[in-house]
Amino acid sequence: MDYALSMTDERLVEFIATHRRLFVLTGAGCSTDSGIPDYRDEDGGWKRAQPVTFQAFMGEPATRQRYWARSLVGWPRIGQARPNGAHHALARLEASGRCELLLTQNVDRLHQAAGSGAVIDLHGRLDVVRCMACEARTPRAELQARLAQRNPDWAGLAAATAPDGDADLEGRDFSAFDVPDCIACGGLLKPDVVFFGESVPRERVDTAMDHLQRADAMLVVGSSLMVYSGFRFVQAAVREGKPVAAVNLGRTRGDDLLRFRVAEPCGQALAFLLDAPAAVAPA
Ligand SMILES: [Zn+2]
């Protein structure tokens, strides 16, 4: 993509230049250029079937079979994803001393891969698996090997599947899929991410709110704010009189609360941070 052709949004340049401690909230729109699909369309609706809920995952063995079969096929693409311009631009923002915290709704760890250090993974991380009985946390890559070993037919499908793997799984029978349990205790394994219908751990929210207190403005990048766990930080910022701006292609749930919204892809809108580091030199 040739960013040189696009106009830099002066409102955004000024917003970043005039606020010394930004609280940044990022969402799926930040990772689409890395090949990780967004859940929402431009009106904030679901692009495809709604994700599995916590209640269904915990309560229904068939839901877990379906989830892990799809995950076995889809994981390589997520696990191999690399940070894009948006991640690099935000890492540069932190390096310039202007980022109080980067709170991300993404579970792909691409901000950390790009070099951001002050990051809270609001919804957890997909590269770790948690045992719901003994709390043991193990690498997702380890589970991938166990999944593949127990389900060789599915593993073959994973190797042969094109980027949008979901379509190839339609109509398949998941009932014979063999789901591994915790090696240590035999407990139920779940990705260490917050599912729909599950609460974000209180302590994680409190820590992020403490950072918001110390920030002087909030910048939303690539989130429609449809999920309350992220939206509440916008509400809190506004309540405390801190200005909020956003970069998001489609409308957001917080549009009425924003100073402005830049309707561009994240990497394009933030490219100036990479091109002109002087624009964000420490104040
Ligand atoms: Zn266990």
Image (cartoon, rainbow, N blue to C red):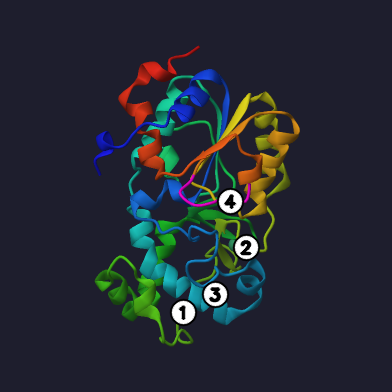
Q: Secondary structure at mark 3?
A: helix
Q: Is residue 252 magenta?
A: yes
Which residue is painted at 33% across and 21% down in the image?
A: 276
Judged left or right of residue 188, residue 281 is left
Quickly name the residue at label 3.
64
Location of residue 271 by image quarter = top left
Q: Position of residue 141 (x, y in %)?
A: 40, 57
Q: Position of residue 244 (x, y in %)?
A: 61, 34
- The residue range painted magenta reads 248-254
Label 3 to label 1: alpha-carbon separation: 10 Å
Q: Secondary structure at mark 1?
A: loop
Quickly name the residue at label 1.
178
Classed neighbour count for the residue bearing mark 1: other residues with Cα under 10 Å, few (<14), some (14–19), many (≥20):
some
Quickly name the residue at label 4.
123
Which residue is painted at 66% across and 63% down in the image?
A: 133
Residue at mark 2: C-beta within 8 A of ligand 1:
no
Note whether residue 90 is visible. yes
Marks 3 & 1, CB-CB < 8 Å contact: no
